[in-house]
């Protein structure tokens, strides 16, 4: 079983430190959720894991399958078995969802074996149908132009379908910036529930408490001020729903004072 290991990760943007030592292990087959108030660095973690050039790692490591993920290009990370959402936020008129997925799959096959001729079309069609059925998606969706006039929910649907087709070992989903409506939340949650299992590990990053009413994470982590300050099981999410973040903040400030 592979796992993504984040160790003492420090990340700066324009010289300002945003992540201040994040430690986290996400195992294949488990669902982890990171929650936290706005501005605590959750998206910074997601962007850093996907290799966004604006984020400078000043300290720490991210390891996956014996490789230092931070030294890999975004497409190499994907080939290694990491799925990072928002790899294609732009509309591609003239390219259908199906064609986009087929070229993504074939690019990955070719990267593993230069001689590969690509997935035969009948095999691709069969696979796509199975995945769409699993995700309860209308087959017509595959014929639409990618992201062209897509609603928030449809963008999520395309993203989840891409995840199903590429079969990553670890998927990282940041739900914060996408203007999620309840429909989109449900699509993400149902997708994660349908696809997670022994093969797929998921890291869901969210400040939407409500997402966790639909996804049942194995582990919940709270991020405050660029660090994970509290980890627990699903009951931690319930506790947050009732109590908010103040108690974590107080506890964290007390510990910080005691150790300074
Ligand atoms: P979260 O996702 O938890 O809401 P972010 O990771 O988006 O938090 O942001 C953490 C902090 O980093 C915030 O103070 C934010 O203003 C700052 N920040 C994020 N992205 C940038 C950026 N591109 N340039 C400058 N500051 C940024
Ligand atoms: Mg965010």
Image (cartoon, helix red, strand yellow):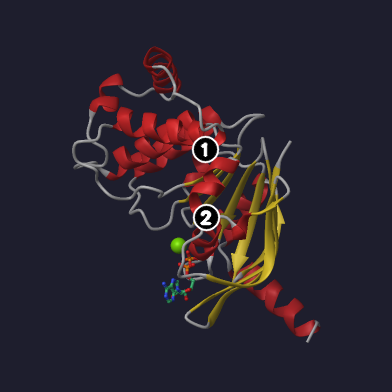
Foreground disc of the pair 1, 2: 1
Does the beta carbon at disc 2 come under 8 Å from ligand 1?
Answer: no
State the residue at coordinates (55%, 31%): 113
Q: In which quarter of the image is ligand 2?
A: bottom left
At a point 31% along the width and 30% down the height, the residue shown is: 99
Which residue in the protein does label 2 denote?
73
Question: 56 or 36, which is in the foreground?
Answer: 56
Q: Which residue lies furthest to the bottom in this view?
A: 260
Which is nearer the N-term, disc 1 or disc 2? Answer: 2
Q: Mark 1 points at which residue?
A: 111
The secondary structure type at the circle numbered 2 is loop
Q: Could you say where residue 188 lies in the image, as x and y percent from the top left?
A: 44, 39
Q: How many labels does the image show?
A: 2
Above or below 153: residue 132: above
Q: Residue at x 60, y 69 (%)?
A: 224
Let me know if residue 172 appears in the view.
no
In screen coordinates, is 254 left or right of 194?
Answer: right
List x then y, in percent, for residue 9: 66, 67
């Amino acid at each position: 079983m592979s796992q993504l290991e984040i160790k003492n990760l420090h990340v700066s943007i324009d010289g300002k430190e945003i992540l201040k030592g994040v430690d986290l292990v996400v195992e294949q087959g488990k669902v982890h959720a990171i929650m936290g108030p706005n501005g605590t660095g959750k998206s910074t973690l997601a962007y850093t894991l996907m290799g966004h050039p604006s984020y400078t790692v000043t300290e720490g490591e991210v390891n996956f399958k014996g490789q230092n993920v931070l030294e890999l290009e975004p497409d190499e990370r994907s080939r290694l078995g990491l799925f990072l959402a928002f790899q294609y936020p732009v509309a591609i008129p003239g390219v259908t969802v199906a064609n986009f997925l087929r070229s993504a799959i074939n690019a990955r096959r070719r990267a593993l074996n230069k001689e590969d001729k690509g997935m035969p079309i009948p095999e691709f069609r069969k696979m796509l149908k199975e995945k769409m059925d699993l995700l309860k998606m209308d087959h017509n969706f595959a014929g639409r132009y990618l992201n062209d006039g897509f609603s928030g929910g449809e963008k999520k649907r395309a993203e989840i379908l891409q995840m199903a087709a590429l079969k990553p070992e670890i998927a990282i989903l940041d739900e914060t910036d996408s203007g999620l409506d309840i429909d989109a939340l449900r699509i993400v949650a149902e997708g994660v529930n349908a696809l997670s299992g022994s093969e797929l590990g998921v890291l869901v990053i969210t400040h939407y408490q409500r997402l966790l009413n639909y996804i049942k994470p194995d582990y919940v982590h709270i991020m405050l001020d660029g660090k994970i300050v509290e980890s627990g099981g699903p009951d931690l999410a319930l506790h947050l729903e009732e109590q908010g973040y103040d108690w974590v903040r107080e506890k964290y400030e007390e510990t910080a004072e005691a150790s300074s």
